[in-house]
């Protein structure tokens, strides 16, 4: 198939899923055309089946807000027309689904009919999409999509709950490439961070409010009161400064390190003992899956789709959002020498269920179904 993929080319989960999906499809022999405003960060190599089309933004003094959606729709029209695509697959509803709708209508007026699939990732539904500034367009463009997928059953349910959706939504969970995300021998790294064999706790995110990083620091403080431990915070975003201040206030800053945005996050995960994801909302929790693939158990909230990934008492524990006491108790339980190896093994076994080779055929079959139906 010749497939156009539209996504945010950033570190965020939806962009990562879209890029990894495109790369995997290209390996299977499909021709993949990425249409984004900059080169997706995980697309830094040559593949004969992968093409990249940059959305050209024209600035003009009148445009206080440059109309990205129009430029994207125009680019989609041209790529579909000249590259003869079979399908468009857009990741994250805003503004990709409405731009795809516009492109499809323009192409129809030129006698070209192409279906588009929208994959819902999370905040496009649970946070931003519900805002009255976007809701009518999000509802319309989901209903007008030829196919819609959600990354968890919980996200599908949330979509039906908050929007007037009159079409089927297929659940296709996120996936992990176990060739890349696996425990590597990085003992020298562990020694450098934990010279006295402290337990190593890790959190990775985009440092937005929804991630509740303050809870990570509170749980870490609780752990450190009982055993020597270090905390690595990977990623960056609006909450960083507030979290730095909190670590100082709680007197744990000497044992907390901010690593910023890291590409090779699997190297850090390879030496971690515990991953913490206390999010207010999390449609799937790809970062937790990456940790589990590197044999790291997970302490998480029970928000959104997390119960579909983290298995209570096996791969880690879940608590109500904000219940840092429960999270701390559970973290201390996992970190006991006799429990840790069991949780680590369970985390890896669970991650294997989401292995790329299990999920990729679900997308391929769904593509075929949508193209046939169209
Ligand atoms: O977590 C974020 O804020 C980034 C966001 C995105 O769209 O890039 O992630 C969402 O999509 C990921 C990939 O499907 C999911 O694994 C994350 O759980 C989801 N984030 C939220 O729902 C908050």
Image: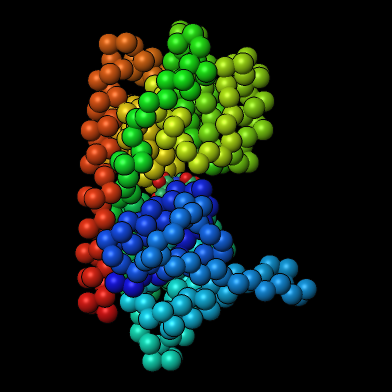
363 is higher (above) or lower (below) than 298: below
**Is residue 219 shown to the viewer in this render?**
no
Position of 164 with respect to 349 (left or right) is: right
Position of 120 with respect to 246 (left or right) is: left
Across and down, in percent, residue 126 comes to 45, 51
Residue beneath the point at 48% across and 66% down: 52
95 is higher (above) or lower (below) than 174: below
Kindly give the residue lying farthest to the right in the view shown. 61
227 is higher (above) or lower (below) than 215: above
120 is higher (above) or lower (below) than 300: below
**Is residue 177 shown to the viewer in this render?**
yes
Across and down, in percent, residue 305 comes to 34, 43
Residue beneath the point at 43% across and 83% down: 81
Residue beneath the point at 56% across and 61% down: 38
Indicate the quadrant where residue 299 lies. top left
Q: Quadrant of the N terminus?
A: bottom left
Q: Quadrant of the C terminus?
A: bottom left
């Amino acid at each position: 198939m010749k497939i156009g993929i539209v996504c945010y080319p950033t570190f965020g989960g939806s962009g990562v899923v879209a890029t990894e999906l495109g790369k995997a499809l290209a390996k299977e022999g499909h021709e993949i055309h990425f249409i984004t405003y900059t080169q997706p960060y995980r697309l830094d190599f040559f593949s004969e089946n992968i093409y990249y089309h940059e959305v050209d933004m024209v600035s003009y003094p009148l445009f206080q807000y440059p109309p990205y959606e129009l430029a994207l729709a125009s680019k989609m029209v041209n790529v579909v027309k000249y590259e003869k695509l079979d399908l468009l697959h857009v990741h994250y509803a805003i503004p990709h689904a409405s731009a795809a709708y516009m492109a499809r209508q323009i192409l129809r007026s030129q006698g070209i009919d192409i279906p588009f699939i929208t994959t819902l990732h999370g905040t496009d539904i649970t946070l931003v999409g519900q805002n009255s500034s976007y809701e009518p367009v999000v509802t319309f463009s989901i209903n007008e999509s030829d196919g819609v997928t959600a990354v968890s059953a919980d996200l599908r349910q949330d979509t039906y709950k908050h929007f007037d959706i009159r079409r089927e939504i297929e659940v296709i969970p996120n996936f992990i490439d176990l060739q890349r995300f696996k425990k590597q021998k990085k003992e020298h790294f562990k020694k450098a961070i934990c010279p006295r064999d402290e337990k190593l706790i890790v959190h990775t995110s985009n440092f937005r409010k929804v991630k509740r990083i303050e809870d990570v620091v509170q749980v870490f403080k609780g752990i450190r009161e009982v055993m020597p431990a270090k905390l690595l915070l990977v990623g960056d975003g609006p909450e960083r400064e507030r979290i730095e201040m909190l670590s100082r206030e709680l007197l744990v800053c000497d044992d907390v390190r901010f690593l910023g945005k890291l590409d090779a996050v699997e190297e850090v995960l390879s030496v971690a003992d515990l991953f913490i994801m206390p999010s207010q909302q999390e449609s799937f929790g790809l970062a937790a899956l990456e940790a589990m693939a590197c044999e790291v158990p997970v302490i998480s909230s029970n928000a959104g789709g997390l119960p579909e990934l983290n298995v209570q008492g096996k791969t880690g524990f879940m608590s109500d959002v904000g219940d840092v006491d429960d999270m701390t108790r559970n973290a201390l339980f996992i970190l006991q020498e006799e429990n840790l190896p069991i949780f680590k093994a369970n985390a890896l076994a669970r991650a294997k269920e989401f292995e790329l080779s299990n999920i990729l055929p679900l997308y391929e079959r769904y593509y075929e179904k949508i193209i046939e139906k169209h």
